[in-house]
Amino acid sequence: MNIIKFKNIALFAATLAIMPSCEENHINDNLYEPAVYLVDNMTNGICSTDKIYDIQDQYEYPVYAYCSGFNEGDADVSISANPGILDYYNTTTESQYKLLPDDCYKITTASSKISNRKAKMIVNFDIKKIIVLSNVEDYSDLSEYVLPIALKSDAGTPVSTKDTLLGFTIVSPIIEKASAIISSTSIVDNQFKVTLKLPFENAWKAEYDIDFGSVEMNEAATGLGNSLPAFYNLSELPQGTTIENEDVRTMEPGTSEVTYTVTLPTQTTPAVQIYKVVLNNFKLDGVEIPVDGDKIQYFMTSNMTYSPTVDRENTANDNAYFGKGLSNYAAWKSFTLVDRSKLNFVSESANNPVSSAFDGQTSTFWDNNWGGGYGPSTIPFNAVLDLGYVTDVDAIEVWRRPGTYVTDTKAFEVYAADQVDANGETIQYGKLSYLGLVDFGNSNNVNRLMYQMINNAKTQYLILRFVQANRTNCISVAEFNLWHR
């Protein structure tokens, strides 16, 4: 039965094969005919060039045409400027783009032949003539100028009619001031890196000055992340420091990047040191160019912090606990408690008595806004610790509040001030020296933190700038103590 059926099917197929064809071949029905269009076309809006830098004389912009369709077609294509399409674009989009003047560009490769479905033409922009059009230092007003381009197919495959805009493009040259970039890494395992880079292919000779370990500081800065501009106690690079590429002060044509690796000798004792790297006079072929990023880079070795484990007891006087546990960490054995008898604390934002922050009891605490609900106080805000006399300060000890909300206080910056006027709700201060960031994080089991200042401060006034809280804007402190070596 199955064999007979198979023979019948075979006979039917053979009959079809010998029958004369009476129908046309429709294999290509419903397939798109080949057509050419611009890859970056007006359906995408304004097309921008890559970044062009004012140090360059010329910039070549490629204009690509592509052949679509199931079958590849042949075509000789060309491009030309077409001001009319810009008028159309401005009208339909209510824009006010300006036509780039004729002397600012040249279509150096106006025609090409489609090969492997694509063709490439080239527009050469004259950068020097374009920047003359600008009236602002950063050339941002040049974004008003564009070049409208139309595609033409001279023979063979036509320009696509699926969307008229596929045959047009509007190009905006993006010009920026040439600049170098300085970047850096943090100190890890006694090593940090400084990198100078040109963000374009360098065709010129670059020359510059770079100084490692300078101890001069002419103006207040925020290079260590401090929010108030301040001076730093800078250190010279210690003896034994090595700098890879130390003598390099140039980049030859074809070189766009130099990295300096600074390796510090291993520290034998915990210490806080700040080193400065200064970049000046960066020039390309004798023309000075700006530097992105801070031309002065600051690097700091690890801060020494210590969280002594002490069981807090609510006694009438906790003075016996201040400093307890330091003997367990040899590096802190040399610290002595600063006299607290003349200490005064003033805050721009206070609710509970500020005296609770230095009354010798860790069971009482000052807070900035607890009694008022959660406001209206906001952070950051400043407070001042007035020691009552000028003395050396090397470390600060901070107790957070007891109880459920021990984590209220997260972080505050510490500064030494040469003078302070704390009358009224605003604290006025003179010259500031940045001493570091005391950061508890959000740990619930740290009720006390010892923080070594950046080098030594000899001062009467410490400005505390509370910058972070773990619960809305609430800041609270049970006790402040200061230490010196």
Image: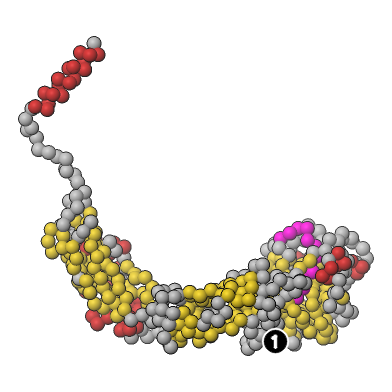
Looking at this view, name the residue that lies furthest to the top. 1
Q: Left or right: where does residue 402 sit relative to residue 431? A: right
Give the residue displayed 76% in from the left and 71% down from the top: 268
Q: Position of residue 163 (x, y in %)?
A: 22, 58
Nearest the viewer among 163 and 73 is 73
Element type where label 1 sits in the image: loop
Q: What amino acid type should be assigned to the residue bearing mark 1?
A: Lys
Nearest the viewer among 402 and 205 is 205
Give the residue displayed 69% in from the left and 80% down from the top: 239
Q: Position of residue 387 (x, y in %)?
A: 83, 81
Residue 348 can be seen in this image: no
Viewport quadrant of the C terminus: bottom right
Residue 116 can be seen in this image: yes
Per the image, the residue denoted by label 1 is 431
Give the residue displayed 19% in from the left and 46% down from the top: 31
Q: Which residues are magenta?
A: 442-453
Q: Left or right: where does residue 18 sit relative to residue 327? A: left
Please tell me in which quadrant of the rendered image residue 455 appears. bottom right
Q: How is the image coloured?
A: secondary structure
Q: Position of residue 340 (x, y in %)?
A: 87, 77
Q: Position of residue 222 (x, y in %)?
A: 62, 78
Please tell me in which quadrant of the rendered image residue 49 appears. bottom left
Q: Is residue 229 part of the magenta span, yes or no?
A: no
Q: Is residue 410 above or below residue 286?
A: above
Give the residue displayed 27% in from the left and 75% down from the top: 124
Please tell me in which quadrant of the rendered image residue 256 appears. bottom left
